[in-house]
Amino acid sequence: MPLSAVAEITRGVGPLTVNHFGQLPAVTLSVQLNPGYAIGDAVDRVTAVAREDAAGEHHDQLPGDGGRVSSRRFAGLWLLLILSIVVIYIVLGILYESFVHPLTILSGLPSAGFGALLTLMVFASSSTSTPSSGSSC
């Protein structure tokens, strides 16, 4: 059976690839936030605009919600911080064979954190998810 029996062949210009989510075409948005704006606010605004502009043309759930993924990724950050301090205490305790010396060393953590935040403020930088997660988004 020839292909022309079931399809029409035409030549034209089109995209090299089409992203899909399931069987539906998908769009990926990349943003650079202005200083003072949170990723959650940006995601809420983009979602609202998408619902207004594409009424009836999209699903109720927007797939690939990267902003929500980022906020969920950092939800357990405090637990991770506490566990890392406990592990550091155990390693230092083994290294110094003492329960007191690790506390002396770990007592410098608050001032080190304050110094890091102060440096970010002085150089007008921000603590984004890229350096804190070790990967680019």
Image: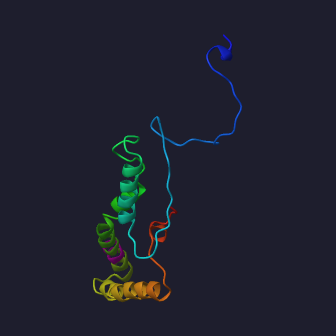
Does residue 32 sit above or below 46 in this rendering?
below
Tell me the magenta residue range.
86-90
Image quadrant occupied by the N terminus: top right
Instruction: Please tell me whether residue 89 belongs to the stretch shown in magenta.
Output: yes
Q: Nearer the viewer, residue 129 or 84?
A: 129
Residue depicted at 68% across the width and 13% down the height: 2
Colour basis: rainbow
Does residue 63 sit above or below 76 in this rendering?
above
Instruction: Please tell me whether residue 36 belongs to the stretch shown in magenta.
Output: no
Residue depicted at 51% across the width and 63% down the height: 135
Q: Which of 40 and 83 is in front in this view?
A: 40
Q: Position of residue 22 (x, y in %)?
A: 44, 37
Residue depicted at 35% across the width and 65% down the height: 41
Instruction: Look at the image and tell me whether residue 22 can be seen.
Output: yes
**Image quadrant assignment for residue 118:** bottom left
Residue depicted at 37% across the width and 83% down the height: 96
Q: Tell me which secondary structure the magenta stretch mostly adopts.
A: helix
Does residue 119 sit above or below 94 in this rendering?
below
With 120 as the anchor, is 100 left or right in this view?
A: left
Q: Which residue, as the protein is rendered here, is positioned at the far top?
A: 1
Q: Position of residue 64 (x, y in %)?
A: 42, 50
**Image quadrant assignment for residue 12:** top right
Q: Position of residue 4 (x, y in %)?
A: 67, 16
Q: How many labels does the image show?
A: 0
With 128 as the anchor, is 2 left or right in this view?
A: right
